[in-house]
Amino acid sequence: MPLARSLSVTSLTGLEDWDDDFDQEDAILFEIAWEVANKVGGIYTVIQTKARLTVEEWGENYFLIGPYFEHNVRTQVELIEPPNPAVRRTIESMNSKGCKVYFGRWLIEGGPYVILLDIGATAWSLDQWKTELWDSCSIGIPWYDREANDAVLFGFLTAWFLGEFVAQCEENPYIVAHFHEWLAGVGLILCRIRKLPVATIFTTHATLLGRYLCAGNVDFYNNLQHFNVDREAGDRQIYHRYCMERAAVHCTHVFTTVSQITAVEAEHLLKRKPDFVTPNGLNVKKFSAMHEFQNLHAQSKAFGLQFGSVHILFIAGRYEFSNKGADIFLEALSRLNYLLRVNQSETTVVAFFIMPARTNNFNVETLKGQAVRKQLWDTANAVKEKFGKKLYESLLVGQLPDLNKMMDKEDFTMMKRAIFGTQRHSLPPVCTHNMLDDSTDPILNSIRRMGLFNSKHFYKERLHFLFFPWIMRSLSGACTVMGIPSVSTNLSGFGCFMEEHIADPSAYGIYILDRRFRGVDESCNQLTSFLYSFCQQTRRQRIIQRNRTERLSDLLDWKYLGRYYMYARHMALAKAFPDKFTYEPHEPSTVQGFKYPRPASVPPSPSLSRHSSPHHSETEEDDERYDEDLEAEKDRQNIKPVAMITMNITASSMTSSASSPTELCSPSSSIIDERN
């Protein structure tokens, strides 16, 4: 099959064009994940944002495979007839045998083809397939684990589709199947057991057992080598899931993780070192007009002026109180509140917690607050209209206005009524909704324990809270693209990636919290220091830092990071089809990229750039000349060139790491036992 391919690279200096003569004709890519057109977690965002670059690379030979859910298809997928004859015959064959397979175009950037498998339509085969999985892999799935049962159905349907596709092709195609996470892992295992001619890739975004151990309040990363993984998985009743994930890891031709820290985790928990890291990226859009964040800032400036100097801090993501750092963030905010009050700071901090939780309705007090705010806004606009009309009439007759006559008694009465309407007899709410588990909610209980309520003297307090129990994904990368400084840790993929590529992350608005080699109290103090330092910045310092933060966007662009996925696919093809594909880069799997130096100008640190007088004006600093384009150009010239990812692939190293697929999948063999 002819392959339409367009490869684009980052515009950063120091990165040479990747000239690749890799022959992809008659190669077809299937990317399989539970979150294809199914928004559940962060993998959805990864696949969605990467789709455009993958379509540019593979053209009509790229297909995504995911589960069919009618409510998702109605809003995200345009069902069409498959243009590929082999895919069309495969779907018709499966549907004639009792399956329900749908084909369409995912309505996202790039418009990739999607193949959706209805697991509910083949639920009648669950017991049979679970028996086959036990007979071939010795992996037993308990009846009560619905998520694992869905993974079995999805995996068998995926393997069925790939096997049928091979049979329906007139010529033997070179197939790459990229599986994401354990929920799709059964399909990969079956591909190897059935010896399908498919080059496989398995990517874990976070190990399953690692998530459970981190949530268990253990010193996880400093004790990785000491865990008895079988016992730990069994104690948490996820042994069958762990076996599915570990078997997929050892069956695949190429194994990748999305960060260096997850690679270390996988090596100890899954007993296989990843071939290399495939970092997650974003589709970075350049704005020819004013900085987007400045536009948003201008729109919300009226709101900010109500409180004077306002700083908005927020945390967002899955509601995992400890894993996502909400516990440390709350403790640091409590200490920040103390520092601001002791130092008589005029800065106001509004902290948002945006995490999904179970609710039954909006909080009535929240709705009242919205109504009161609207009343104030309408009153102010009404008085402004009358004031403007009188001012115009005065100027029209050639007279300067008498300000004492611009507003009458009725205007003052209207404004007083609006002010009296803002009075409340209870404390302002800290949550926008009525929580179903209010008494046990960890965020609300921490706020109660620390006494961090929004007091009745709202405008005099320095710190205010608002908990949004809504769904919102983690936004570290997106914040960077928009020029919003962020705090991460050295236990996250984003934090490790930034530490690796930036000489002084904090100068670029990326604050890295040490959670690996410090205790909880020390980490809280470090985070408090970060937040307090940020609150002390002047307007000019914030602008400089915001510009520097946005300058890192090229580093997170899929145009740059997408090449790691290209390497993974090329490596898988070379391992699965050594007679057709060869690939001989230079050195082992190392992930190195740009190394951003310290900024050419002084970092926007209050301790370094503030005047000796504590009451200097921001206007005075604004007069100091700062040329963002000049500093950016100096930084670009100093960026160290990228060291290309290279791997030594020879004919002797292209075989699988185990003698047979059955041995790979058996929990009683080397997959589960410790290796020498």
Image: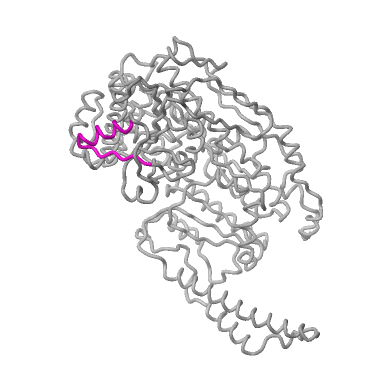
Relative depth, front residue between 17 and 621: 17
How does the figure colour the protein chain or chains?
one colour
Q: Residue at x 55, y 46 (%)?
A: 478
Let me know if residue 510 appears in the view: yes
Quadrant position of residue 187:
top left
Which one is in front, 46 or 413? 46
Q: Vertical placement of 584 versus 445: above or below? A: above
142 w.r.t. 617: above or below:
above
Coordinates of residue 507 in the picture (x, y in percent): 68, 42
Q: Which residue range is magenta in the image?
A: 87-104
Q: Quadrant of the C terminus?
A: top left
Residue 103: within the magenta? yes
Looking at the image, residue 121 lies above or below residue 403: above
Side of 548 where 260 appears, left or right = left
Exactly how many numbered labels are in the figure? 0
Name the residue rendered at 56%, 54% in the picture. 333
Q: Indicate left or right for 456 with 294 as reference.
A: left
Q: Residue 251 vs residue 400: left or right? A: left
Q: Is residue 353 magenta?
A: no
- Residue found at x 72% / y 82%: 391
Q: On the rendered image, what quadrant is the N terminus found in?
A: top left
